[in-house]
Image: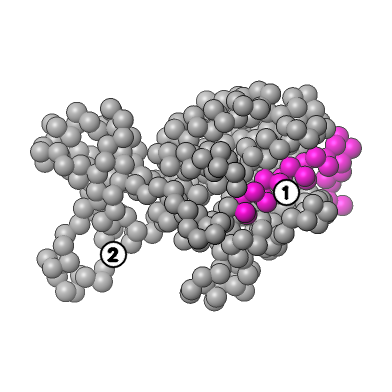
């Protein structure tokens, strides 16, 4: 991956942007889109839409959600400690003892999630997980008055964990679910801006996916696409203790290319078109079967209005919903290329009626 492209990815994943508070991520994404998009649109929900070839046909929507899981300040007590509630699906073992960053009144405020020392926990309770509603954040304030000068009830916060390159093309960050997807849809639009597509392309950084696929639903209603492809992260099974899930999730490996989903959430003709385009462009793929709704933006897009020809492309991801989600940068590039070469084949005459 080029240094400039990777720098955009790094800036995007290190923003503080949990569901409902995506402003920082949207700002970074919009600034990058402005370099090549024909139009950039926003809606009142917070979705950001970069348009390529306005007026083309049909309308194709790419969706990568730019929100992440996080927390919300629910109470500031008289001693200056912040009590918090979860945004999105947390494993309650993860947050304890972590550093956090709060988007406060004056900017980013550092803090830590506190917990009693192991020495002072009763032996019978040491193997129990602290409930999320029993966690607090300590910003070092001497009392509630000082804390309230910096932080307000309703301020969002996330685990303070940044972007890091590992060996080879591996990278780790807190926000790859799913700002890796938001990155991919914009990179696909960048590629298409030089490919003269027949279709009108909408690359959308959707919001509030982690709390119910909300942004994709409203964005798809407004855009009214005939084709919609969601890009999200998918479960890699190439690390310890995941082998028992291979029969359900498939054998998914980092560095082996995009995961393309097949099942009732997916339009069969769009799936076949992606497979054909990938083969001709020599893009490696991994196929995953999903017998129900996928639980991604593809689900919300497919059920929009009278129905949309939906597809789902996933980036293999280890350690999902932790501060150290891991991806392979080659997979991100392959995902963007797959969306671009597939969409370049679509014209107003392309038939997506399944039978």
Q: Quadrant of residue 23?
A: top left
**Visible in this render: residue 222?**
no
- Name which residue lies at 75% across and 27% down: 53
Cβ atoms under marks 2 and 1 closer than 8 Å:
no
Compute the Cα span from label 2 to label 1: 42 Å
Q: Which mark is residue 129?
A: 2
Left or right of 242 in this view: 348: right
Residue 331 is a magenta residue: yes
Mark 1 closeness class: few <14, some 14–19, many ≥20 residues within 10 Å: many
Residue 48 on image: x %, y %: 57, 30
**Visible in this render: residue 24?**
yes
Comparing 194 with 20, the one in front is 194
Seen as rendered, the residue at the extreme right is 349
Q: Which mark is residue 225?
A: none
Mark 2 closeness class: few <14, some 14–19, many ≥20 residues within 10 Å: few
Residue 89 on image: x %, y %: 43, 53
Left or right of 184 in this view: 138: left
The residue singled out by tag 1 in the image is 338
Residue 248 on image: x %, y %: 61, 70
Seen as rendered, the residue at the extreme bottom is 244
Secondary structure at numbered mark 2: loop
Q: Quadrant of residue 302?
A: top right
Query: What is the magenta range?
Result: 330-355
Residue 269 on image: x %, y %: 82, 51
């Amino acid at each position: 991956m080029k240094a400039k492209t990777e720098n955009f990815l790094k800036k995007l994943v290190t923003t503080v942007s949990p569901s409902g508070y995506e402003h920082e991520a949207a700002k970074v994404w919009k600034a990058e889109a402005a370099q090549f998009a024909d139009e950039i649109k926003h809606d009142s929900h917070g979705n950001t839409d970069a348009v390529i070839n306005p007026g083309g046909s049909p309308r194709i929507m790419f969706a990568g959600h730019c929100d992440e899981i996080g927390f919300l300040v629910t109470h500031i007590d008289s001693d200056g400690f912040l009590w918090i509630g979860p945004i999105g699906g947390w494993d309650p073992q993860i947050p304890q003892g972590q550093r956090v960053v709060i988007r406060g009144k004056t900017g980013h405020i550092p803090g830590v999630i506190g917990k009693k020392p192991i020495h002072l926990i009763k032996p019978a309770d040491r193997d129990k997980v602290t409930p999320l509603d029993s966690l607090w954040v300590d910003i070092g304030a001497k009392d509630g008055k000082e804390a309230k000068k910096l932080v307000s009830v309703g301020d969002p916060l996330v685990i303070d964990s940044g972007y890091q390159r590992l060996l080879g093309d591996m990278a780790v960050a807190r926000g790859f679910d799913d700002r890796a997807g938001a990155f991919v849809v914009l990179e696909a639009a960048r590629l298409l801006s030089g490919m003269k597509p027949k279709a009108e392309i909408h690359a959308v950084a959707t919001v509030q996916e982690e709390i119910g696929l909300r942004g994709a639903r409203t964005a798809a209603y407004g855009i009214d696409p005939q084709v919609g492809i969601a890009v999200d992260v998918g479960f890699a099974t190439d690390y310890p203790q995941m082998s028992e899930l291979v029969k359900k999730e498939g054998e998914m490996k980092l560095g082996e290319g995009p995961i393309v989903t097949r099942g009732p959430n997916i339009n069969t003709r769009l799936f076949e078109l992606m497979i054909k385009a990938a083969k001709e462009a020599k893009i490696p793929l991994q196929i995953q079967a999903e017998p129900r709704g996928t639980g991604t933006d593809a689900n919300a897009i497919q059920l929009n209005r009278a129905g949309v020809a939906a597809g789902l492309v996933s980036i293999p991801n280890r350690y999902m919903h932790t501060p150290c989600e891991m991806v392979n940068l080659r997979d991100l590039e392959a995902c963007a290329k797959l969306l671009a070469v597939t969409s370049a084949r679509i014209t107003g005459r392309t038939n997506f009626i399944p039978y």
